[in-house]
Amino acid sequence: MKAVLWYFIALFFARRGPAYFRGFLRLLSVKVVSRAISNFQIGSVEVSIGKSEVEYISRLAMIDVADDEVEQVSAKLSKVLDLFAQMEAVNTDGVEPMAHPHEVAQRLRADEITETDQHEKLQSVAPATAQDMYLVPQVIE
Amino acid sequence: MLHTLSVKQMSEKLHAGEISSVELTQHYLDRISQFDPELNAYVTVTPELALEMAREADERLKNGTAGVLTGIPVAHKDIFCTDGVKTTCSSKMLDNFIAPYDAHVVTLLKKAGMPILGKTNMDEFAMGSSSESSYYGPTKNPWDLNAVPGGSSGGAAAVVAANLAPMATGTDTGGSIRQPASFCGITGIKPTYGTVSRFGIIAYASSFDQAGPMSRSAEESAWMLNAMSEFDSRDSTCLDMERPDFAANLGDSLQGLKVGVPAEYFGEGLDPEVEKVVKDAIAEIEKLGATTVPVSLPNKDLAVPSYYVLAPAEASSNLSRYDGVRFGYRCENPTDLQDLYKRSRAEGFGAEVKRRIMVGAYALSAGYYDAYYLKAQRLRRMVRDDFTNAFEQCDVIMGPVAPTPAFNIGEKTDDPTSMYLADLYTIPVNLGGFPGMSVPAGFANGRPVGLHIVGPYFSEAKLLNIGHQFQQVTDWHKQTPAQYQ
Amino acid sequence: MSWEVVIGLEIHAQLTTKSKIFSGASIAYGAAPNSQACAVDLGMPGMLPVVNHAVIGKGIALGLALNAELGKKQVFDRKNYFYPDLPKGYQTTQMDYPIVGKGYLDIEIDGETKRIGVTRAHLEEDAGKSNHGIVPGMTGIDLNRAGTPLLEIVSEPDLSSAQEAVAYARKMHELVTFLGICDGNMQEGSFRVDSNVSVRRPGEPLGTRAELKNINSFRFIEKAIEFEIERQIDLIESGGKVVQETRLYDSETNTTRSMRTKEEANDYRYFPCPDLLPVRITDEDIEAVRATMPELPGAKRARYVAELGLSEYDAGVLTSSRAMAEYFEALLEHTGGKDAKVCANWITSDLAGALNKAGLDIADSPISEQMLAGMINRIQDDTISGKIAKQVFDAMWKGEGSADEIIEAKGLKQITDTGAIEAMVDEVLANNPSQVEAYKGGQEKMMGYFVGQVMKASGGQANPGQVNKLLKEKLSS
C-alpha cells in the first residue's frame, strides 16, 4: 500500500518537471514521509495544518507551542497557507526564480584582519558566561 | 514655536545663530515628555545623548563645519542599532539589548550632526502594518488616537506627524515607510534596494529591507537621504556606485512627465474616498504639466502571496540567532538545550513574529520548497517585470499607498491575512526593489491619505522632485493634528 | 560469498587565510576563548557577511589541481539548524552552485594507479567549539573557530578498501598542503576526514552506509574503516541490518560505536543566503590563480626522476610535503645544483632520520638549507670527507655553528697534502709486509685494509681519493 502511494507521489513530482522532482528528492531525504503523505492531495499542494504539522513546524522553528495554543496556531497558519494557494494556479514555466532585485555579483573583501578582541564588550549583553565562554545547558555528544 | 518651523527654516536659524541646537533639541525633548505618554511613539528617549550631541552640533555651527542637517534632531526607528543605547526592535527578545555598534545609517547621521532624540516604536521585528505588535504596546495615530499609525515604522511616522521630532528614520520591507507615512500624513521614501546600507539594521527579510527618511516634506527627505546613503562595504548588497545629489532635481519642472496609472491599483477593495484623494492628487500633478498614461501591472495580486512566502522564509532564518545564548532574552531555568531554545523563543517573540517564523520554516521545509519558495521567487520576477514593462511607457507610476486610511486599533489583529492585504499596493514595489514614496495628498474619513509614487531603479531624485513640486501647490504636508500644533 | 566495500570520503580542509570567510576576525589557532569571535561571527543583530577574496582563490586552486569543473557562478546557501556552536542558527555553505565541480584524484595502490572521482568541493564556514566541565551541568561555547573558512571535498564512492581510502586521504592531504591552501594539521582539526562506509554483495545495489567522524590520524582512519567493514559484514551475515548513522571510533579499544541518534533527521531548509550575492569568477580570475600555483607533487616527482636522476623512492620522500620539496630545491640551489643525488641522500637519510627521532617537521629543522648546503659544498671541494661530514652534521644539529665554523674549531679539515699522505702510506705498507705480500699475490681486497689503516693513521682526515691513488701506485710499483 505504501509503495503504491510512493509511486503516485513520485509520478506527481516527476510529471511536473525537474524542479518538482528535486522537491521529491528532498522529500525522500528526510523522515517526513508520513507527514507529507497525509497532506498531499494528488494534483494540489493545498495544505491544512493539523496538530502533528504544528508540532513539526514548532520543532523546525524551535518555538514551543503549548497544547492549548495548538488549535489557534493551526487555524492562523492554515489561513496564511490559503493565501499561498493562490500561487498554485499561476503558470510560471520558464520563469527564473528571483533572489535579489539587482543582478550584480558578490563583492569580495581583502583577506585582512580588521577585527580586534572585543569579547568583553560583546559578552556584556550575554545571558550567561564563564571563563569568557557562553554557557548553555550541558550538551551531550 | 520652534516645532512649527520647516527643517529648512530651522537650519537657516541654526546657521544664523538665531537658535541653538541645544534649544531646539530641548524643545523637542519637552514635547516628548508632554505628548509621548499618550502616543507611545518612542520606546526609548535619550535626553542626555541628544543634548550632548546638540552641544557638539552647536560647536560645529560656530566653527563653520556644519552641514544643512547639523543640529536638527532625529528619531531613529528602534531597528537601527545604536552603540550604548538600547535597541529592542520592539521585542521582549531584545528588551535588554544594547548593541555595541552603530548601524551605518546612525553613523552617517551622527556625522551629519543630527542629535538623537530616541528610538521609535514599531511592529515587533518590523513584522506588521499597524505598530500594534510591539512588546511595548501600540503606538497611536496623532490624527486619531483610536487609529493605528500604520507600520511597521508607525512610531517614526507618529513622531513626525505630532512634532515630536522633525525627522525620523524608517525601514521598508513591504511598505513599512510608505504606509505609516500615508496613515500619518507625512512624507516618506523607500529608496532603490541597495542604496542605503543595511549594516546594523536588525534584519527582517534581507532581500527586501531598505531604510529611508521620514519627514514632513519631500525636500527634507531629499536632504536626509543625501545624508544617510553612502556606499558601505560591510553590506554585500549595498550598491557600489556614486550616489547622486538627491536634492539636485528639486526645482525641475514636471512639464512632459509621463505618469503611469495602473488600472489594477484602482480596483475592488479600494476605499472610494481614498480613490478620490489619489485621483485628485494625480489631477493636480497633471496641472503641473504631467500627462497620464494607462499602464498595466497584471500580476499585482500575486505580489502578496509571493511576499508572504519569501519574507517569512528569510525571516525564519534571520531570526534563528535569537536563541537565548549570546544576547537577548533567555527563559528561566531551562531544563536542557532544547528547552532553552524553545522556551526562550516562545516567550521572547510575540505572536505575529512566531507566526512568520513558523510560516517561513514551513515554506522552506522538505517537500514544500519548490511549491512555495521557488514558486514565490518566480512570481517575484513576474511582478518585477510588470513594473519594468510599465516603465517603458511612463516615467513614474502613481496610485494609492493603501486601500484605506488608517484603520482602528484592534481592527485587524485577529486576522493576519487581512492585515497582510493592507500592503497590497506597497509590496510589489519591494519585490522589485524599486524606489517608492508616499506624499500627503488629503484626507478620507478625517484620516490622512498618501499619494504613492513609484519609479524605476535610481529615480529617487525624480520622485522627490515630483513630491516637492506637488508640495509647492498643496499644503497637506504642513497640516498637523490640532493638539500637536 | 564475497563482499564489496564501498567508501566515500568527505574531507573538511580549513583554508590558510588570515581572516574568516565572512568577517575580518583572525583565524589563528589557540587564541583565548571568544577573543577572535567578532560581532559578525557571533551573529549579532544587524551584522552582515562579506566574502573573503582569498577563499575564492584557494578554491580555484584546488579545482585546477583536481582537473575539475569550476563554478563560474557560485551561490552561498543557508543550512538551517540550531546548535550552540552555530551562532546564527544556520551554516552558510554552497549547495547547488559549489566552487569546484566534478574532478578526480589519482592514487597509487600496490603499484597501480587508480582514479578516484571527486564529486564536488564547496566553501563553507566552520562552527565553534563546545567545552565541557567549566561549570557543572553546563557547556561553555567558544566561537573563535566559527566562520573559519572550510573547503568540504566530497569524493565519489569509488574507494573499495580502507587502504584505498587512506591513500586517497593522504594524497588529498599532500595536495592541499602543497597548494598551500590548508596547513594539514590533523591534531588541530585543520584537515578532517569523515568516511562513509558500506558493504554489499557484488552486483547488488549500494548498502546502507555508516559515517565515521572526527578521526584525527590516517592510521586510525584506516583502523576505524577496517573495523567498520568487519562489523557491517558480521552484522549482515548474522541476519542484522546496517542502520544509517554516525559512528565514533575509539582508538583505545579499536572499535566504533553509535553516536546518540538525534530525535529526528534534520530538515535543513537550504535556501540562498539573501545577505550575499552570487560569486562570479572569470577566466582571467582562473588564469591568475593558475599562474601562481606551485608545481604539484606528481609533476614534481616525475621531474625529479627524469631530470635530476633521483630514484622513485627519493623523489617520493622529497615530495611528501611542500616544505620538504622546498627544502630540497633550496638545498640544490645553494649547492650550485651540481649533485641532486647527494642532496637527496643527505635529506632522506641523515636529516629525515634526525628529524624523525626528534619528532620535528622539516620546517622546524635546526639545520637550515643554507647550513646543510655549506656542509655539502665542503665535501664537494674536498675540504672534508663524507665520513667527517657526518661528524659535522651532528655538530650542526646540536647547534655548534656552521659547517665551516665546526670544521675550523674541531680541526676536521681533510689532509690533501700529498707528501703527508705519502708518508702515512709508506708507513702503513712498511708495517704490514705480509698483507702487502698477500695483495701482490692476488688478494686485491686487501686494498680496503690498507685504506682503512691509512685513514686511521690520519685520524680520518686524509682525502680518501688521494689515499687510494697513492696506495695503488705504490703497490703496483
Image (cartoon, coloured by chain):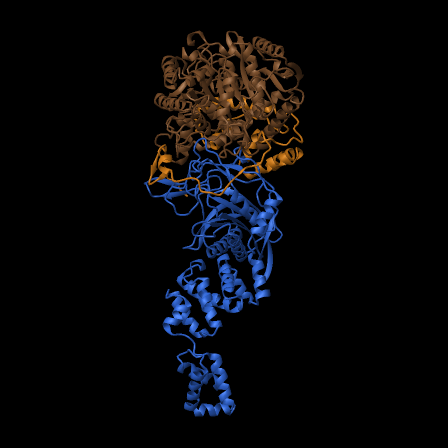
Along the line of sight, the residue nearer the viewer: B276 or C454: C454
In the picture as drawn, the residue positioned furthest to the left comes out as C136
Q: What residue sits 40% from the left and 62% below the top? A: C358
What's the colour of chain B in the image?
Answer: brown
Along the line of sight, the residue nearer the viewer: A63 or B475: B475
Question: Where is residue A99 shown, x and y percent of the image?
Answer: 58, 31
Viewed as shown, does residue B175 lie left or right of B392?
left
Question: Where is residue B70 shown, x and y percent of the image?
Answer: 43, 22
Residue C219, above or below A103: below
Viewed as shown, does residue C68 lie left or right of C226?
right
Which quadrant would the C terminus of chain A be assigned to in this image?
top left
Question: Where is residue B175 shown, x and y percent of the image?
Answer: 53, 20
Q: Which corner quadrant of the image does residue B454 belong to? A: top right
Task: Count every numbered label the image shows and give the total.
Answer: 0
Viewed as shown, does residue A53 lie left or right of C29?
right
* Residue B171 makes an appearance in the image: no
Along the line of sight, the residue nearer the viewer: B361 or B193: B193
* Residue B173 makes an appearance in the image: yes
Residue C452, above or below C257: below
Residue B16, above or below B110: above
Residue A93, above or below B144: below
Q: Which corner quadrant of the image does residue A115 belong to? A: top left
Which quadrant would the N terminus of chain A be assigned to in this image?
top right
What's the colour of chain A in the image?
Answer: orange
Question: Where is residue C376 shown, x and y percent of the image?
Answer: 47, 69
What's the colour of chain C in the image?
Answer: blue
Q: Which corner quadrant of the image does residue A44 belong to? A: top right
